[in-house]
Amino acid sequence: MSKTAHTPGLLELHDEQEERQAIEIHPVGDEDGLTTIADVLWASSETAIRRKEGLANAHRLCACWNACQGISTEAVEDGVVKELREACQALADEAMQYCNTSICRDPFLWPDAKLSARIDAARAAIAKATNTKG
């Protein structure tokens, strides 16, 4: 587990460097390019294929870093993102089951009139995160 604080803030991709077969990841706003967080390399005899994979990896690294803002490194390493997704799925399933009961079919009896919209939003977020239909 990480004991040192990581660089705070969001990340972005910087210039692709063909001669090095790499792309750099920097903090957002690092205009002078002096703070490299990572170099993603794709050196290979199959350069065109590996380049696409290297760029995709760099995009994923930035996206994951940026999506986990506010979550400790230890929690990420311990699988909290997966746990949050699973908990959200279970909650959405349970809420939908509740809303399918005869009592909840009458919107005047709902404890919160926005419940259905919230369930739909949770299911849409889960579908987007898992690349499945909601």
Image (tube, helix red, strand yellow):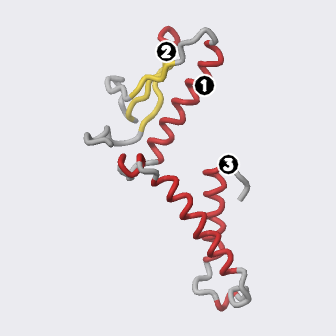
Please report the residue visible at 60 percent of the width from the left and 63 percent of the height from the top. Answer: 89
The image quarter containing residue 35 is top left
Query: Residue 62: x, y in percent?
Result: 48, 36
Looking at marks 3 and 2 on the same chain, the residue that comes earlier in the sequence is marked by: 2
Circle 2 is placed at which residue position? 17
Looking at marks 2 and 1 on the same chain, the residue that comes earlier in the sequence is marked by: 2
Please report the residue visible at 65 percent of the width from the left and 91 percent of the height from the top. Answer: 109
| Image mark for residue 131 | 3
Horizontally, residue 63 falls left or right of residue 129, namely: left
The reply to whether discs 1 and 3 touch (Cβ–Cβ < 8 Å) is no
The foreground one among 85 and 124 is 85
Furthest toward the left, the residue is 4
Question: Looking at numbered disc 2 in the image, what kind of residue is underneath it?
Answer: Gln
Question: Looking at numbered disc 1 in the image, what kind of residue is underneath it?
Answer: Glu
Q: Nearer the viewer, mark 3 or mark 2?
A: 3
Horizontally, residue 15 falls left or right of residue 55, namely: left
Q: Answer above or below: position of 10 versus 104.
A: above
Label 1 – label 3 distance at C-alpha: 19 Å
Question: Looking at numbered disc 3 in the image, what kind of residue is underneath it?
Answer: Asn
Please report the residue visible at 48 percent of the width from the left and 23 percent of the height from the top. Answer: 40
Q: Is disc 3 placed on a helix, strand or loop?
A: loop
Query: Residue 31: x, y in percent?
Result: 37, 27
Looking at marks 1 and 3 on the same chain, the residue that comes earlier in the sequence is marked by: 1
Q: Is disc 2 placed on a helix, strand or loop?
A: strand
Circle 1 is placed at which residue position? 53
Horizontally, residue 81 falls left or right of residue 37, namely: right
**Quadrant into which the C terminus falls:** bottom right
Query: Residue 42: x, y in percent?
Result: 54, 17
Q: Residues within 10 Å of mark 1 (few under 14, many from 20)?
A: some
